[in-house]
Amino acid sequence: MSAGWRFVVSRARTQSAVLLAVLVVLVAGTTLLGTCALLLTTAQADALTAALADAAPGDVEVSTSLDVVGGDPATLVADATRVIDDTLAPLGSTTSTWLTSTMLSVPGSAAEPDRQGYLASAPDLADHARLTAGRWPRGRLSDGSWETAVPEFTAQQLGLGVGSRVELGGTPGQPAGPPVAGTPSAVSVVVVGTFAPTVADAAWSRDVLDGAGYAPSWEKPGTAGWVTLPTYGPFVVDPSELLGAPGGLAHLSLVARPDLTGATPATLGAVRASLATASRDLAAALSDRVSYPSVASELPRTLDTAASQQRVTRSGVLVLALMGAALVGAALGLAGMIVSGRRRGERELLIARGAGRTQEVAAAAGESLVLALVSAAVAAPLSVALYQGLTRVPLLAHAGITGHAAVTSRLVLSVLAGSLLLASVLVVPAIRSADRPARARSGLRGRAARSGADLLLLGLATVSYLQLRDHTSGQGGGVDPVLVAAPVLCLAAVSVIALRVVPWVARGAERYARRSRRLVVPLAAWEVARRPQSTVVGLLLVLGTAAATFGVSFDRTWSASQTDQADARVGTAFSVDLAPLPTLAQGAALADGTVLAGATGGAPAPVTHRAVGVGAWSDSSTTSGGTWLVGADTTRASTLLRGRLPAGQTWAGLTAGLAPSSPVPAVPIASDADGVQLTITGTASAGERPLRLVPTVIVQDEWGGRAPLVGPSVSLDGQSHLVTVPFPSSPRPIAAGLTVVGVDLRVTAEALVDPASRVLSTPLSVTAEIRGQGRQGPSDAAQWAVSLPTSSIPSVTDATVTAASENGVTTVTTEATLATYLLSASPAELMLTPFAAPQEVPVVVSEDLARATGSGPGTELGLTIGSATVRARVVATAPYVPSAVGHPAILADEDLLSRAVLTQLETATLTDVWWLGTDDVVAGTAERVRALGLGEPVSAAATADGLSSGPLRVGIRVALGLLVVAAVVLVVAGTVLHTVSSLEARSVEIARLLGIGIPRRAVVASIAVQHAAVNLLVVGAGAVAGGAVAIVVGPHLAVSETGQVPVPVPVPVMPWAAEAVLVAGLLVVLTAVVVPVAHLLVRRAGAAHLRLDGTS
Amino acid sequence: MSASVEVVSPMVSVRSVDRTYGTGRTAVHALRGISFDVAPGEMVALVGRSGSGKTTLLNVVGGLDRADAGTVRVGGTEVTSLDDAGLVSLRRDMVAFIFQTFGLVPILSAAENVGIPLRLRSLPVADRERRVRLLLDLVGLGEHADHRPDELSGGQQQRVAIARALAGSPRLLIADEPTGQLDSETGLAVMALIRAVVEAEGMTAIVSTHDPVMIGLADRAIRIVDGHLVEP
């Protein structure tokens, strides 16, 4: 062992207590960094796994769709499955197969002479439907016919039951004869069961009719859509039958769900790469046996989103880790200064004996190296233990972050690097003390240097803040340097500036001391004002308090921003999104409102939420996804619409005037009815054959939702036809509250109109009797209006309407002229409504749409909604439209919007989403709605919780908590160290004070007052600094989950009560720490210390 | 006719005082059976080499330290039986110390240092400032009232310490090597000042020193060697 090491070891033995204190601080700091490293690595990996495990199936599944052209079906399915399995091979997957046959003719009836149906097969169909009678098909019967199961609604429409036999086959719509090439031979199926498709099951989107069981008009094969037929299905058969029928398979759908439980970034990357070429691989594998093969998956987008969130979270955690490192650095600087002070005499002796600067620094560096190594060895397992402890905190545990962490080489390297970095601070006092004589800086030069450093730091902080303010994150997987650097620099700069202000404030204490006749407080005041306070301890206290204050405030700002973002994103308190789900039966939305109201006890509101066209303007942005239209009941805006607006604005105020002045005078339906009863009487013909009319009743439910119910076609032969349009099936009676708000009349020809008939037009007369409740309905017959197509060559002209209402029967008669020659191209259509067509729809537009289109209050916009073009007029602009954040968007009143669309002959329901307002959401609402299978429930509260405490986001909050705790601990520890060292340094002086007759009690009191005052100043300065950074910088740090500026723009939140408790608690703890230390040291001060004063 | 004899009680009476630091083989016997008296108004020089026990004896007399055995009376008060509060009162009202290293509070000006004993008595501010000025003028530092210790020479600092000692109007002045850190000329001046003040104020003083010149200024000298009092 060299002399230098012997000296270091010997010195360490004699100064073991103080070195132990330094080691404790170093270990604490290194452990903090190690834990942050685990939060940045292990926790992020866990978070990704947890997030993917919680992801909706549609976000991770891989869907394959293809039309079959030829080849052996079984081989084709096997080949397609192999391609998908190979694509997902690194993860493993489970695959669901759905087979659909070509269209087959279904025996006709008098009303529907030509109709078609299809076979389908899916091994896992039982998971997506409920048997209502019989059993699932198993294969063939002994007579060679195939067993089949059909949807209950299909069975009702076709009059089938268990045991019914149906002959399917041939080309639909053609006279009986041999089957056309490429279609299967006729097949006889026997119904062995009926089933009800599971509501809200996305699997039914793979069905031709989305599980509806019936479509009044579906494309007839081979006619390119020019000819449509009533279509029924699926006739579910055993998979082996369909795969064994060459030419019978028309469509194959494969959905593979990857197993993400053990996913790693490497395997996910491999799958992502495979998915990019999957469509090509599939096409190559199946070659000319299929057409339109495609492989689609949201998994890459889901991974991109997750990566973006992780990037933002990593940046946030790194910010807080750096703040923690700065704090630990300050604490170690203090510890180093104390050690240096203890060694002043020793150093002077060594210098007197010829020791050089290099030797002194080398000894300090060697000692720091040993401390760093010891610290790293201890901190690595401690980091794992602390991390595992943190994962038991509900915040992390609920997010699915497991405590599976181990001392890995990466952790050891991280901890070692952090420990060495922190320990290097301990060398600084040695360098400074060795350097001081050489530099011989004057006080003036020192102050100038410090001021220059302060200004430099302030300048850097200002520049970084300006960058942060203008910053919007780019994409990528790394850490955002602007997000990381700016807050740390700002906090450090403001803390340093605040520290420089403290002495100026303290000097005010001198004036009090001079005027006082007593000693204790004036002595403390003099100490505060004149005793050179340690810059390092001051910096530690200011920085620590600032970090803690910042942490508390930023946590609230961040959380409030997540809540604001969730409110704006969901748009309301609770939303049930119907969009991703297939429509199982016509008018199903009518039942949804009633069921939803029954389940929640609230008043659901139907909402339109879809992309629309706006005049000739198109959004060139690749990310916004077009212009979104949100239609909601604006008369309930105050409770229905959510999302923070700028001060002084409310949604109720912004949307005032959007709603129509009075409700629709609709025709109420008898509460015990099972459908809408119409009596249609009409005359119209093309040539010798009477035309047919398909009535569509627009029904409105109690909550304002409107949906079309298509009735069977009737002949316009002058006879009265009683038609019952059935309500959709519902677990609850839905007739109560239903009203009729319109009747659409679609006139079709039974066959192509023969041009040779030379009949160009014909008069049309239709009378529709709507049987409502037994009493006189509220409908005012005089208000009924007729709307016609707006095309340049209208198929209907000269329409008039008359109406009368008596004994609950509303009779509406319309007279018009039909252009029969146009019937070959499309049906003629009229819409009868108990309201006039709105001239325009007043709307509120988002500011980005207003900017993009140059619109403002008064501007007219043309909105394309389905086949309708609605004239809208802008009455106001808003920063955003609820539920359409990130899109140019338009907000309108749902009722008026629906009226405008209906009078444009667009009958499709506008209800995309159901909303529940703030007053209607109670505990358990989401669970009940999910159990009912109405759609995907989304609540603002749950969304906010996911944004702030979701697996990919929770790291920030945990790191914030760690920062606050670490700051408090380091501030208290630093105060103890500093108090002990400073009072020990003053022990002789204290003994003198006692010697001149000052009571011990007074000396202790004076010290306590002095420290309390200093603490008050520095803690106060730190609180102001932290608060200022939280207010100025915090909102810019609270970026969205993708790193963008959130909507709405965050506002700083200062939790005054929490901050007051924090600051008061710190002051109390710090003072409580000082008093016993001062008491102990004052008691020790006495004659012995006076003897140290150099006397004999 | 009977003659009356006026018996003057000593200001300081020390009887059989022992003081030992530590125990066992490492025990240091600082004072062993010390006994002596100091008459009121008398200035006594306590002479001895470094480590002889001078400071320990002064601390015991002034109530900064406690004797293991024996009694000490100051102005009729038995110091050795006083509790902590009594000792504080003793130091505040009866005894004043002057230390070798001056004992000034470094962050206070000369005037503020001198004012400390007066603040202990909660003297009105005006009275305090007047007395401080008087005392600083007395020690010749009236123009240095606002200077801090590090702005004064050693002699000046010790004169401030003397003024502070006098501020509380003590009956006993204890000076522990008051010239130990001063050059001989300054030391002589300080010693002369102490001598003058003691005479002017009628105080009793015990001054430890090993400087023969300083000893000459005292009324008498007592010598201490290894904790024992010996005749000079």
Image (cartoon, coloured by chain):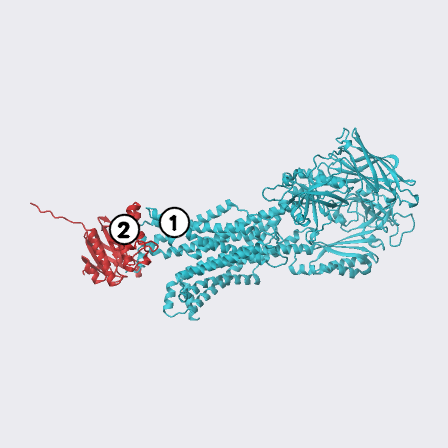
Type of the residue with mark 2: Arg
Tell me: residue A526, above or below residue A86: above
A742 relative position to A543: left or right: right
Display colour for chain B? red
Residue A121's x, y, as percent? 80, 51
> Would residue A160 be seen by someone viewing this image from the given angle?
no
**Mark 2 belongs to which subunit?**
B
Q: Where, quadrant-wise, is the N terminus of chain A in this rendering?
A: bottom left
Tell me: residue B216, above or below residue A222: below
Residue bearing the label numbered 1: A509
Tell me: residue A660, above or below residue A1039: above
Local SS, label 1 = helix
Q: Residues within 10 Å of mark 1 (few under 14, many from 20)?
A: many
Type of the residue with mark 1: Ala
Q: Classify residue A536 by image quadrant.
A: bottom left
Numbered circle sitting on residue B133: 2
Residue B70's x, y, as percent? 24, 53
Shown in cyan, the chain is A
| Residue displayed at 68% across by 53% down | A623
B52 relative position to A441: left or right: left
**Mark 1 belongs to which subunit?**
A
Q: Nearer the viewer, residue A510 or A794?
A: A794
Residue found at the very far left of the displayed protein: B1
Numbered circle sitting on residue A103: none
Q: Residues within 10 Å of mark 2 (few under 14, many from 20)?
A: some
Report whether mark 1 lies on the same chain as mark 2. Answer: no
